[in-house]
Amino acid sequence: MERTRPPQFTRRMTVRQTAELIREGATGDEIRRRVRNGELIRLRRGAYADAGPATDTERHRDLVVATLAQLDGKAALSHFSAASLHDIPVPNGTLSQVWVTRNSGGGGHLSPHLHELKAPLDAGDVVQLAGLPVTSVSRTAVDVARRTRPPYGLAACDRALASGVSPSELTEQVERWPRRPGIARARRVVDLANPLSESFGESFSRWVIWQLGLPMPILQYPVDVHGRRYRSDFGWPELGVLGEFDGRIKYEGVLDDSRSLADVVMAEKRREQDLRSLGWQVTRWGMAELHEPHRLRYQLEAAFRIGVQHRRP
């Protein structure tokens, strides 16, 4: 059974309803002035947030709180809104609306700030996060996979497995609704999902590699060199090749007051020299190659040819 983690809100929720501001003594004109001056941010009609630095995900969580306060309490946050609470990566542009699902039949409802769908929700499909009704991690991952491009669907399912969801739980979500729109796309990424993927870039890489028909790698492949253990994003040991997705996210969380970016880059160079000293062919790519798959194909096939020639027994 999947384990539920509380969402990691990185700042205090600051949603204010118009009625609350008026009770505090503000007038309609004053509220509008504070919005013009940048002291308040209008989330939607009748709801505001205190101004201040915020990521798209944080601002979406404000919009979620503002929107749920105006609903009847019978809808669960779902799809991309649920993904933002479960720390599942979502495509740009999907957080301008709050996504909810009602446990009923019929059509949904679409407005500038709300995307409401109607679909069956079983008891295990809804959990409580920070007091909010949210579709479970497994339901959310499959719903995202049905609604978006495969790289994001794969990243969602990878993250679900990493959070403790079992492969059978994802498969069950797919098999329960065989005629739901997008389910064939979701089934493909569920079959490819792997809990060892550590970033969207790594998930995207595996999707492209699979599409190209190239050998699928071992993830987080360990190599021992002179008493040190290194771990590569991707390993093809039978071909003598190690692969690294080299996006900006690679260096997040490794910099502190004692380590500069130059220190980290130099350590990476030493690491690569150590790996090459054992005959490994090391190849790196970034988002540019993933968006132009023929470049990644050429790069990997060249690495495979060289790696086989220099592979040590």
Image: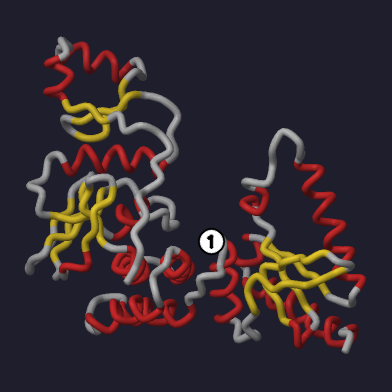
Label 1: how many residues lie within 10 Å, few (<14), some (14-19) or many (20+)? many
Which residue is rendered at x = 37% and y = 76% of the image?
A: 186
- Please state, as top left, top right, bottom left or bottom right, where the C terminus lies in the image: bottom right
Q: Nearer the viewer, residue 247 or 292?
A: 247
Which residue is rendered at x = 92% and y = 71% of the image?
A: 277
Which residue is rendered at x = 40% and y = 78% of the image?
A: 167
Which residue is rendered at x = 28% and y = 45% of the image?
A: 130
Q: Quadrant of residue 241?
A: bottom right
- Please state, as top left, top right, bottom left or bottom right, where the N terminus lies in the image: bottom left
Number of numbered discs present? 1
Q: Quadrant of residue 41?
A: top left
298 left or right of 13?
right
187 left or right of 216?
left
Secondary structure of the residue carrying tag 1 is: helix
Figure check: 161 above or below 53: below
Residue that sits furthest to the front in the current view: 227
Q: Quadrant of residue 297?
A: bottom right
Please name the colour scheme applied to the rendered image.
Answer: secondary structure
Residue 50: percent from the left, percent from the top?
A: 32, 24
Q: Nearer the viewer, residue 221 or 23?
A: 221
Q: Does residue 32 show up?
A: yes
Q: Does residue 94 show up?
A: no
Residue 287: percent from the left, percent from the top?
A: 62, 60
Residue that carries the numbered disc 1 in the rendered image = 200
Figure check: 32 above or below 136: above
Residue 312: percent from the left, percent from the top?
A: 89, 85
Q: Report the amino acid beneath label 1.
A: Phe
Residue 99: percent from the left, percent from the top?
A: 24, 54
122 left or right of 189?
left
Figure check: 65 above or below 110: above
